Image (tube, rainbow, N blue to C red):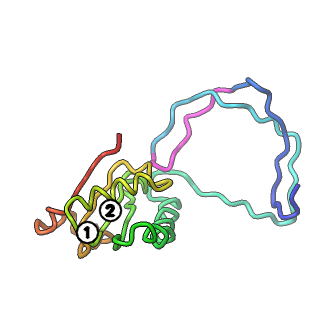
């Protein structure tokens, strides 16, 4: 086992062996249906002295994963701008559970530019799971949801589409 390991679980899985488990809580605050899962037979636990066990608590949002979502938004924005430099800012609001709704402000340069951004987002790694993408003018603060609406003067740039 790697010397840097904190906790190692040893065991085996019998091919075809299943056990009905669930429902399990998800970060959306909903629960999955019970389902059949492979069975892991634990034979040994090895750990270093004072190991670190990383985890998050799953429950009704917002929970710890909300802050992980905000961090990923800030971490990945500079990399996304390398491909799409016209992006001013983006936000994964808790109301969209971080991947169902993306708000993006862009420096719009031509008709249909918002559609280009949406299609590009649906082709960028985990952003392909975005259900709804709302694209607005660069002077709209996508981080400020307190307004609850976008002024009419920006309405011509809003494009909202739902993935298939």
The residue under the point 42% across, 54% down is 97
What residue sits right under mark 1 in the picture? 146
- Judged left or right of residue 144, residue 42 is right
Left or right: 162 in relation to 25: left
Give me the disc on residue 86: none
Residue 102: horizontal and vertical position, in percent?
36, 58
Looking at the image, residue 39 sits to the left or right of residue 23; the answer is right
Q: Quadrant of the N terminus?
A: bottom right
Query: What is the secondary structure assignment of the residue under circle 1?
Result: loop
In the image, is residue 35 part of the stretch drawn in magenta? Answer: no
How many badges with numbers are in the image? 2
Residue at 48%, 62% in the rendered image: 69
Q: Is the stretch drawn in magenta largely helix, strand or loop?
A: loop
Marks 2/1: CA distance? 14 Å
Q: Residues within 10 Å of mark 1 (few under 14, many from 20)?
A: few
Q: Is residue 110 above or below residue 120?
A: below
Q: Residues within 10 Å of mark 2 (few under 14, many from 20)?
A: some
Q: Is residue 25 left or right of residue 163?
A: right
- In this view, the residue in front, 84 or 46, is 84
Q: Quadrant of residue 83?
A: bottom left
| Residue position for label 2 | 103
Name the quarter where the C terminus is drawn. top left
Residue 152 lies, with reference to residue 121, above or below; the image says: below
Q: Position of residue 133 (x, y in %)?
A: 32, 55
Instruction: Identify which residue is drawn at 39% across, 67% down.
Output: 84
Residues 55 and 88: in front is: 88
Residue furthest left in the image: 152
First to last magenta residue range: 19-29
Looking at the image, residue 160 lies above or below residue 106: above
The secondary element bearing badge 2 is classed as: strand
Q: Closer to the N terminus: mark 2 or mark 1?
A: 2
Front disc: 2 or 1: 2
């Amino acid at each position: 086992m790697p010397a840097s390991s904190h906790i190692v679980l040893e065991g085996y899985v019998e091919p075809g062996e299943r056990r009905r488990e669930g429902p399990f809580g998800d970060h959306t605050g909903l629960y999955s249906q019970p389902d059949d899962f492979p069975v892991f037979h634990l034979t040994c636990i090895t750990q270093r002295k004072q190991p670190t066990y990383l985890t998050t608590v799953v429950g009704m949002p917002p929970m710890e994963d909300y802050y992980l979502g905000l961090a990923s938004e800030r971490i990945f924005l500079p990399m996304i701008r390398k491909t799409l430099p016209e992006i001013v800012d983006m936000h994964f609001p808790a109301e969209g559970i971080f991947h169902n709704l993306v708000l993006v402000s862009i420096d719009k340069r031509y008709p249909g530019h918002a559609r280009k951004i949406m299609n590009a987002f649906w082709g960028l790694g985990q952003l392909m799971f975005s259900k709804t993408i709302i694209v607005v003018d660069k002077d709209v603060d996508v981080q400020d949801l307190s307004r609850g609406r976008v002024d009419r003067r920006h309405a011509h740039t809003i494009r909202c589409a739902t993935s298939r």
